[in-house]
Image (cartoon, helix red, strand yellow):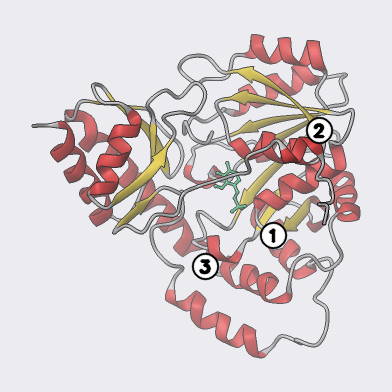
Amino acid sequence: MSRPSVRADIALRKGYHSPQVVVDVRLNTNEAPVAPPPGFTEALHSVLDNINWHRYPDRAASALRSKLAERYERTPAEVFVANGSNEVLQTIMLTFGGAGRTAATFEPTYALHSHISKTTGTSVVEGDRRDDFTLDLDEVRRVVDEHAPDVLFLCSPNNPTGLVDPPNTVEAVLKIMEGTNGLLVVDEAYGQFAHSSAVPLIGEDVPLVVSRTFSKTWSMAAARLGYLLGPAWLVAELDKVVLPYHLDAFKQAAGLAALDFGEAMDERVASIVEERGRLIEALGDLPVTTWDSGANYFLFRADAMGGDELWQALVDKSVLVRNCASWPRLDDCLRVTIGTPAENDALVAALREILVH
Ligand SMILES: Cc1ncc(COP(=O)(O)O)c(C=O)c1O
């Protein structure tokens, strides 16, 4: 039997992989180190009882959008929700990308921006960040002048470098894009861990959207829930593209319930930020280079050991971090998610044993 032919550009691709290795200390996927507050899980039990399981969910996810809008002092029409922020990004690309269209990324950055773009048939142009991973506005101007991208991605804090693009940088990029009809997407999956955000720049006449997620700060990676804030007219276009009833009733209710625990979440974010400072400081007397971060992870590199070798040595000590050693522009780098204090101590102890003889 012959196999139906896969789209040639898909057949050539490798797919997105993040190894799931069984270890004691998992610091590789930027999840929250602890489960949601107990009150949240209790609230979910009553949610279960109140769902009309034989009916389709509210297609517009109105209650969830309203509550998110309240949190950001926006209108519900300026909020789009989907199954994780990756689906938000995919919906953007289905709406603004496609054959004959172009997306721009500034590398190194989150691999899914180009992955999703390519999957939707969008051409990708890669600009470079500076050697210190900051955004180079001259390079942005070059890419915009040469390619007039339909979608330009920024990621702030950037994954995997942890660097934040401050609002004046985002404003400068918007200025460079003026007159191109391009859309600026700022991926703020880790926005709550940073000191600044592009959200205040959103406006009905500004070609800017900001995507966020419940996966990280809200300890809800398992739920797959993300959202976008942007102009109401643009959200209406995204709503045309997404599948009918894409967000199931339980997830909508879980998101609503989570938003009742805003204060607990803010406290958790504060303690992760504190722990991030402690961990980076603890690595200060080890032979490694670390990068400052506005996220719940940071990048580091051993001064005298290859990244692959160090990654394996850590796995041998049952500590899993993300191996970025062979990623373009990230020679020998590893990325570590901030864990619980005990997990972070285990990482420091393992690094000390490996690197200090
Ligand atoms: C920068 C960035 N954006 C988006 C996502 C996707 O998050 P989710 O689909 O879980 O909301 C991730 C996940 O790791 C990420 O690192």
Q: Which mark is residue 122?
A: 2
Nearer the observer, 134 or 288: 288
Residue, x 62% and y 22% (percent of image)?
169
Secondary structure, mark 1, is loop
Q: Earlier in the sequence, mark 2 or mark 1?
A: 1
Can you tell me whether the CB of the residue at mark 2 lies under 8 Å from the nearest atom of ligand 1? no
Say which label, 1 or 3, has the lower sequence index.
1
Q: Describe residue 56's horizontal placement relative to residue 14 as left or right.
A: right
Mark 3 is on which residue type?
A: Phe
Residue with the mark numbered 1:
83
Q: Is mark 1 within 8 Å of ligand 1?
A: yes
Which residue occupies the foreground of this view, 329 or 5?
Answer: 5
Q: Residue at x 42, y 34 (%)?
A: 293
Residue 96 appearing in the image:
yes
Residue 291, how many percent across, how many down?
A: 37, 27
Q: Is residue 353 left or right of residue 91?
A: left
Compute the Cα span from label 2 to label 1: 21 Å
